[in-house]
Structure formats: structure tokens, C-alpha cells
Amino acid sequence: MKVAVIRFPGANCDQDAYYALKDDLGVPTEYVWHEDTSLHGFDAVFLPGGFTYGDYLRVGAMASRAPIMDEVRRFAREGRPVIGVCNGFQILCEAGLLPGALLPNAGLKFVCKNVLLQAATKSSFWTKNIDRTLTIPVAHNEGQFVCEPETLKRLQDNEQIAFRYVAEDDKDLMYNVNGSVDDIAGVLNEQKNVLGIMPHPERATREILGSSDGLEVLKPLLEFAAGEGLALLKA
Amino acid sequence: MELLIAAGPRLGLSDVLPATSEPSPVTRHSSLTNQSLPKWSQMPTETPASGTLTKVRVYVTLKHSLLDSAGRTVAGSLQKLGFAELEDVRIGKMIELTLNNFTEERVKAMCDKLLANPVIEDYRFEVVS
């Protein structure tokens, strides 16, 4: 089991992801340059956050057309784990690997804070073991998940909504920090092996960072390492 | 660049921006033939014969079914300035392309492949010169 962290120009969470996966989760991890054309020898892909290509034109637009994305598409097709965080989520949407798109936050402000998250489905290997509310930070300007009403209905019916923002109590009215439709913080593709998530699990992998709940989101990669995931793939 | 074109001799894009455009066969070996190269003042004043340049403006707008938060904020501000007749503001992008050998299909392909995201945006374009 080896995870590829794709490096794009302008990404700035690639090292966070690399060390979180390698040291805190304990799964072999290597960087792969966006202009490379092969993911041979890898089993999973992590698309890190940042500001690829300066967020010019649309967030994730240019990065989603990078040469390595053909291989990411192959991984998605073959049912291997693909996770995109923040800008990585935006790239997966722009690449057409995930439904919907991410618009500027409804409040028009960059939001940088801890949020509360709940897994919204048990039907994916990414979320099936997450039973409690997670505290994970967000840091984004374009995190408002939008899609056509028919698409939303399909996501709800197929259980493709992976995570939702949840309120701490009834006074917590701003829990959905970006105005995402249906409080969506993370979505899955139809096959449920591709996960896009706005909060940063790789920034919450040890207590000194304020939370280690991010490990819950990344743990399925370990299961793949142990071979359980491959069985999941076949099932 | 607009000024340069308007005031001086008509230069093609490749004359104005030699470093960023595909080098012509003459400039490609400039280090060897530097002596024989014409000076800036002697550059050809006509658009290169390789093709006519066409300027196309692409307008990319957010789909009407989506809330345009920035547009709504601007609308609120304009209304506070006394423009009570204002019903709505939508903010979009204008992208100007300068093309050799313009064809509608190629510009459409550029929009479909990169310039607009069909999930959230519509586009249209017009030839301006």
C-alpha cells in the first residue's frame, strides 16, 4: 500500500498531507509531480489543498487538466481510494470525478476555524466506521458546495453525501460555514471510492494540532494497506 | 499594449510580445544571427502575413439558478446609493482572446474544455475585430 500525494504549482498543503499520512497515520507515502503521467506502484491518491494556479479562472480549473489527472481518473474508475481535500476537492469537481461545484462562501469571507462534522452515510469505506462527531479545521474561500436540484436528489438517494456540517447546539446558527446546500462538507462519486471534503483531516492528526479527529477520515487508507479495502473493492 | 497599437505602427501580437509567443524562425536562432536582425524601429509595420488576428470576447456568467453572493452584495450597495430601480446584479467574467485563424468551433471548444464550467456557468462569445 502506497499513497501518492500529488504536487501542483500553488498547492500548499502537500507537506501537511505527506507527513500526516506517513508519520501520523503510518502509511507509505510519496509525492508525485502533476506533470508525471504514471501512478504505477501506488494504491491511493491524495489531492492536497492550496491555491493551484493562483485560483485563476475558477478554483481547481487548471489543475484538473494536468497530465497526472488521467491516472487519477483511472484510479477512480478502478475503485481505488482517491481523496481530495479543499482545493483537491475543487479539482476533483472540475475534473468531473465528483458531482457539483464549489462557489465562493455565501458570506464572501475566507473562513478559517474548526468545524463539527458528521459522517452522513455508512455505505462507503470512507465513512462506515465514523460514528461520532469530528472536530476538523476548514480554511477556504470557495467552499460553498452547489449542484442542480436533480443532482442533489440523486446524491441523497444514492447516499453519496459523505459528511455534513453539524451545529454544536441550537444557538450555533453559523455551523454551515460556507452556505453549502444541504450542509454538505464532503461528497462521494457513484462508486463511493472518490471522496472530496472541504475540511482538512491532514491538519488534525495529533493532539498538539488541536485535534486528532482527522485520522478517522484517513484511516480507511490503512484498511486498504491491510488488504481489507481490496476485499471491499471486490464486494 | 492597447496604447502601443493605437498610437504607433500596427504591430502584431508576436511583435509586441516576442518572449511569450512562439518564436518565429528568424528569432529562434537570434544568438547566431543577431547582427542581421532588424532593430525594433525597422520591424515590419504590418500584421504578419501568417494569418489575420481576430479578437473574440467570451462572457462567462453564473447560471441563473445559482445565487450570486457577490452580485447580491453589489446590488445592496447600489440600492443604498439611491438606485431604487435596481432589481438584480449578476457578476460574470469577460475573457478576451486574440486568435490566429478564428473559427467558431475552436472557440467553443476552448469554452467547453476550460473557460466555463457547465455545472455552474453559461457562456457566450462575440467577435469584436
Image (spheres, coloured by chain):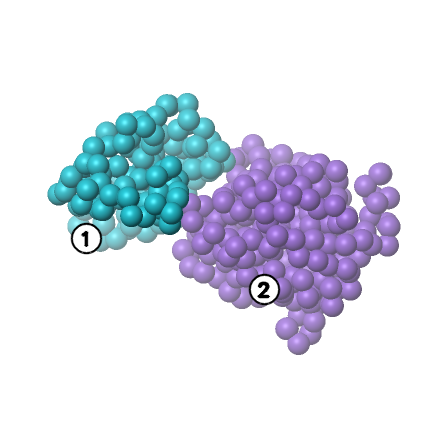
Chain colours: A purple, B cyan
> Comparing marks 2 and 1, which lies closer to the viewer?
2
Q: Could you tell me if residue B99 is visible in this image?
A: yes
Q: Dot 2 corresponds to which residue?
A: A137
Residue type at the position of mark 1: Leu
Which residue shows up at 22% across the image and 40% down it?
B43
Check residue A153 in the rendering and tell me which mark sits there, or answer none: none
Q: Secondary structure at mark 2?
A: strand
SS type, badge 1: loop
In the foreground, A154 or A210: A210
What residue appears at the point 25 percent right and 53 percent down from the top-left corner?
B77
Q: Position of residue A227 (x, y in %)?
A: 86, 50
Question: Tag 2: Cα neighbours inside 10 Å, few (<14), some, or many (≥20)?
Answer: many
Q: Chain of mark 2?
A: A
Residue A205 position within the rendered picture, expressed as x and y whole percent measured from the top left:
69, 67
Res. A131 image quadrant: bottom right
Query: Label for residue B81?
Result: 1
In the picture shown, does residue A110 fall above or below B102? below
Residue B54 visible in the current orientation: no
Q: Residue furthest left?
A: B7
Q: Residue furthest bottom?
A: A208
The image quadrant of residue B88 is: top left
In 3D space, how far apart are the residues under numbered discs 2 and 1 (Cα atoms)?
Answer: 38 Å
A132 over A38 or under it: above or below: below
Quadrant hosting residue A22: bottom right
Query: Which kind of residue does numbered mark 2 sit on?
Result: Pro
Q: Position of residue A24 (x, y in %)?
A: 73, 67
Residue A102 left/right relative to B40:
right
Q: Is residue A129 left or right of residue A71?
A: right
